[in-house]
Amino acid sequence: MSSGFVYAVGDEAESLKTIEVKDTDAIDMLRWPLAHNVRPAGWSLGVSGCTECHSDTGKIFASTVTPIGPGPDQGEPVAMYTLQGIDPDQRLAWNELFTNRASFKWIVGASLSILTVTLLLGLGMWIGRWGRPETAKQNAA
C-alpha cells in the first residue's frame, strides 16, 4: 500500500500491479496528530501567535499534503482542513474569531470595567442612604 493505492506482485518479474479496493477507508491516508512530539516547542506552529495557524493562509488549514510512498503512483494533493473534517465555512468563521481576538479582549475588559464602576457607585449610594436615616425622614416630610 502506498499513497492510497494497493499493489501486488505483477505477472512479469519485478513488476507491480494495482489492485482495486472497494473499502477505500482501509487505504486512507495515515493522519498523525499535529506536532506529534518531533519538534522543539520554539519551532512549533503557533509559537508567534494564534493567527499563525488561525488565518486564511495559516499552514494548518491552507496547506496541502500530497501522499507519497514507495509505490510508483502519487496520490492527489489534499487540503489540510479536509483531513480534519472541518467545513470550509466553519473554518473561515473560526479564523475570523481568532483574528479579532485581541479586540474582543479589550471590549470585554472595558465592559467589565464599566459594570464594576456602576456597581460600586450604586453600592456607595445605597450605603450612604443606609447610614443617614434622619435625612431620609426629613426628605419625606
Image (cartoon, grey):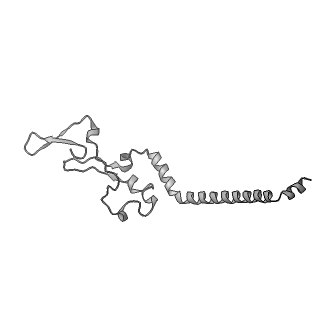
Residue at 36 percent of width and 50 percent of height: 80
Residue occupying the far right of the picture: 141
Image location (x, y in percent) of residue 118: 70, 58
Tell which of 49 and 65 is nearer to you.
49
Residue at 60 percent of width and 59 percent of height: 109
Left/right of residue 16 with respect to residue 129 in the rendered view: left
Image location (x, y in percent) of residue 107: 60, 58
Tell which of 48 and 9 is nearer to you.
48
Residue occupying the far bottom of the picture: 42
Q: How many marks?
A: 0
Residue occupying the far left of the picture: 13
Image quarter hosting the N terminus: top left
Left/right of residue 129 with respect to residue 82 in the rendered view: right
Residue at 66 percent of width and 58 percent of height: 116
Residue at 24 percent of width and 50 percent of height: 68
Up/down of 89 relative to 23, above or below: below
Image location (x, y in percent) of residue 65: 32, 51
Image location (x, y in percent) of residue 12: 8, 41
Up/down of 97 relative to 8, above or below: below
**Which image quadrant is residue 7 in?**
top left
Tell which of 94 and 4 is nearer to you.
94
